[in-house]
Image (tube, rainbow, N blue to C red):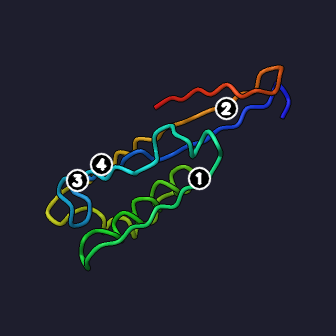
Amino acid sequence: MTKNDVLFYARIKSIEFNNYRNIENGVIDFPNSDFNEYLIDEKPSILGIYGQNGSGKSSVIMALGILKDILSGKALSRKYESCIKEGCERCTLNFTINLYSKAFNDKGNNIVSNKE
């Protein structure tokens, strides 16, 4: 790394659901999303989603798919209309994303900063 190199990281901190599929109101907080040794040492972390049938695992995966489509500039498919809870006019998904940058000084040492 040279002194002009900067590495960027993004981690989802939480997702808030309102009138989304079978969820009236809910929040999921993701572990290891805050600045920690995983980002300092550049070690990967693994997230597993598990639960009983009907507990919302597929809803979380579909929400992440919506985020992916939006961030990649794709138009949302009509299949996402089914995400609006029955009897409601709209649903909302609020993503909190932590952004981190790691810059290197002229001695090759890293200087770390983060933003939410």
- The residue shown at (47%, 54%) is 67
Q: Nearer the viewer, residue 37 or 96?
A: 37
Which residue is situated farthest in the left direction here? 87
Occupied quadrant, residue 94: top left
> Marks 2 and 3, Cα distance to the nearest angstrom?
33 Å
Residue 26 tag number: 3
Looking at the image, is mark 4 or mark 3 earlier in the sequence?
Answer: 4
- The residue shown at (50%, 52%) is 70
Label 2–label 3 contact, CB within 8 A: no
Residue on which disc 2 sits? 102
Residue on which disc 4 sits? 16
Q: Amino acid at mark 1?
A: Ser
Q: Is residue 84 above or below residue 42?
A: below
Q: Secondary structure at mark 3?
A: strand
Q: Nearer the viewer, mark 1 or mark 2?
A: 2
Looking at the image, is mark 1 or mark 3 earlier in the sequence?
Answer: 3
Residue on which disc 1 sits? 72
Q: Is residue 17 above or below residue 55?
A: above
Q: List x then y, in percent, for residue 71.
A: 54, 49
Q: List x then y, in percent, for residue 13.
A: 41, 44
Q: Amino acid at mark 3?
A: Gly
Label 2–label 4 contact, CB within 8 A: no
Q: Amino acid at mark 4?
A: Glu
> Marks 1 and 2, Cα distance to the nearest angstrom?
24 Å
> Marks 4 and 3, Cα distance to the nearest angstrom?
6 Å
Task: Judge left or right: residue 29 versus residue 90.
Answer: right
